[in-house]
Amino acid sequence: LIAVQREFLDDASHQLRTHLTTLQMQVDYARRTDDAGQVRTALDALANEIGRATRSAQQLLALGRSDTAAVAMVPVDLQALLRAVALQWLPQARAKRIDLGLLPSTAPALVAVGDPGLLHEALSNLVANAIAYTPVQGSITLSATADAHDWSLQVEDSGPGLTEAERAALGQRFRRGANAGQGGFGLGLSIVRTIAQRHGGRLLLAARSAGPGLHAMIVWPRSTAAADTVAAP
């Protein structure tokens, strides 16, 4: 455990130092130029890098919480959870003209047992990834299902998708797909995988059935022990 923690801290420190180094270079460039247009360009670059650094810090904190936070197993309305996350990310989706929507449930109510805060964090990371890698005018669909054995939260996007090898590797900390660009460093799916495991479940990544894209699923079991905990006074 100590070795894993040390490796995580080393990797996290490297990534945060990269952000700080980039910010310092942009500040130095802005100080050296007298051209107002170039200063404006430098300020825009600074704003973008601050946004990336903020997202990185948030992901590191979320990953730490998902590793150590107690899991509060309570009833969770999955359709309400989908709507809350969709509304949270709707402005970013609209900015890229992405059709972000919910697949209607055939069940009148879909109430699972889980930790609402951690599940919100996990689903939010899946949607954030989908928005980042789905092209302009693409589509992202959120859905929830349940059967006799499992509950699931699902996100499908019309992005470039992942190869089979990438799908197998992603979810490990600091691993990124070939299409990741410069927007993050592979913590989003690691957070999702950790939260799924804390629920006794798993993160599944598959090719989208209707054309290119990714189908991400958080699946966790209908645990009798969890249900008993909820029912207990």
Image: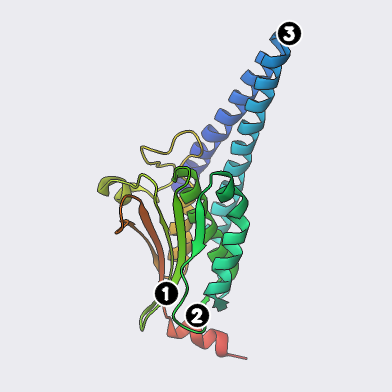
- The amino acid marked with disc number 2 is Leu
SS at badge 3 = loop
Q: Relative to 126, does residue 185 appear above or below in the rendering?
A: above
**CB under 8 Å between callouts 2 and 3?**
no
x%, y% of residue 79? 53, 73
Distance CA(mark 1)–CA(mark 3): 58 Å
Q: Relative to 115, does residue 181 appear above or below in the rendering?
A: above
- Sooner in the amino-acid sequence: mark 1 or mark 3: 3
- The amino acid marked with disc number 1 is Thr
Q: Which residue is mark 1?
A: 145
In the depicted view, which residue is nearer to us: 153 or 131? 131
How packed is label 2: few (under 14 Cα within 10 Å), some, or many (20 or more)? some
Q: Which residue is mark 2?
A: 110
How packed is label 3: few (under 14 Cα within 10 Å), some, or many (20 or more)? few
**CB under 8 Å between callouts 2 and 1?**
yes
- Sooner in the amino-acid sequence: mark 2 or mark 1: 2
Q: Is residue 75 left or right of residue 35?
A: left
* Residue 160 in view here: yes
Q: Quadrant of residue 86?
A: bottom right
SS at badge 1 = strand
Distance CA(mark 2)–CA(mark 3): 60 Å
Q: Which residue is mark 3?
A: 34
- The amino acid marked with disc number 3 is Asp
Distance CA(mark 2)–CA(mark 1): 8 Å
x%, y% of residue 50? 65, 34
* Residue 69 in view here: no
- The residue shown at (46%, 76%) is 105
